[in-house]
Amino acid sequence: MKIENIEIRRVTLPLVRPFRASFGTATERETTVVRVTTANAEGWAECAAEPDPLYSSEFLDGCDLVIRDHLVPRLQALGDRLTAELVATTLAPVKGHPMSKAVLETAILDAQLKETGVSFGGYLGAVHDRVPAGVSVGIMDSIPELLDAVAGYLAEGYLRIKLKIEPGWDLAPVRAVRERFGSEMLLQVDANTAYTLADARHLALLDPFDLLLMEQPMAEHDILGHAALARLIATPICLDESIESARDAAAAISLGACSIINVKPARVGGYLEARRIHDVAAAHGVPVWCGGMLETGIGRAANVALAGLPNFVLPGDTSASNRYYAQDLTAPFVLEEGHLRVPTGPGIGVEVLPDVLADLTASTSNIRF
Ligand code: OSB
Ligand code: MG
């Protein structure tokens, strides 16, 4: 495939409400949108990194730099032989930077699929035409405020609630949500690495609340710690930050560090590696679900396609556009009976709204191929 141009654009979307996790609070979503132009198609993707390196080591300014100076030149060297399937191996000599690699691979894959008329879901092997949606609920200032938020999401039809937790905001919110909404609702928690093994007895106090899972309680590289914690608590452990590849997934499963995996394509370098994690987990009988990074419609479209694969058996953090944005970069994803529809058009299957994109753009640069 011959690429003619790569456009790199910094955009900022206001969030409808602040989103607080153990590592920080976001009031807007800043991202880098990449547009790849070929003779016959345009491919789009967005970078999942945030302005500060608090979720993982990547951050947007760093991504822009590594994309421009280290990743794109390696792709240019391939010339017309470039395909989406060659991106990861071509970029492998550059250590790390999975989110920077993912945005390039995804935009190139989108252009390639549009050239051949294949949808993301069709290419990846989705078997569902709609996927169940959960919602990730941030840390709040008070329990009543949290209960209002959860009540609103349940009324909209979300099928699973995930509560962000941290030391000091864990037992009380979980207890309050269970007391108010009952034991039937699907409920899980996400600590974003806020605890250590010394907190094991405290985390075991969540056992009676029958949570679906506890996501990433401890540091990303503490695989053995998670294996030890798994033996001390009844709640199943799900890893997010720890899993950067299919090899990581195989190791974590084998060591007993997790029994569920949150698959975020950006965290693992793209959709091809994300599919391999799906496959490895399926081979071990480990269920997966699709995580999110507050994506705009561009990234959401591809995530929803991935979530259509057979081993994505738990509702994902694939919420509707209006949970994040009053105005999305694409036509909004809407909740239909608690589900989002998997796009069927070529590539990501959604159109970027040019006027909205232009309004929200702070800067644009182009790399001619
Ligand atoms: O840990 O899953 C996470 C958002 C930003 C960074 C990390 C995480 C999250 C979420 C929200 O939990 C997921 C979403 O709705 O996109
Ligand atoms: Mg998480």
Image: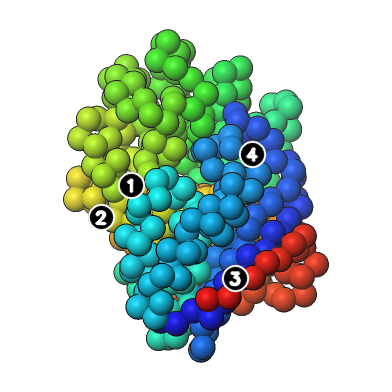
| N-terminal label among 4 and 1 | 4
**155 lies above or below 354:** above
Q: Which residue is mark 4?
A: 52
Residue shown at the point (39%, 36%) measured from the top left:
242
Which-is-in-front pick, marks 2 and 3?
3
- Is residue 311 or residue 177 the one in the foreground? 311
Q: Which mark is residue 279?
A: 2
Q: Residues within 10 Å of mark 3 (few under 14, many from 20)?
A: few
Q: Does label 2 point to a residue whose CB lies under 8 Å from ligand 2? A: no
The image's mark for residue 367 is 3
- The residue tagged 1 is 245
Disc 4 to disc 2, how far (Cα)?
32 Å
- Image check: 84 left or right of 132? left
- Residue 175: x and y, percent? 56, 24
**Element at badge 1?**
loop
Q: Amino acid type of disc 1?
A: Ser
Label 1 vs label 3, nearer the camera: 3
The residue shown at (51%, 60%) is: 103
The percent coordinates of residue 111 (x first, y second) are 48, 78
User: Which residue type does callout 2 highlight?
Assistant: Asp
Image quarter (top left, top right, bottom left or bottom right) of the N terminus: bottom left
Residue closer to the observer: 178 or 317? 317
Foreground: disc 1 or disc 2: 1
Could you tell me how far apart the alpha carbons at marks 2 and 3 are, in whole angstroms? 35 Å
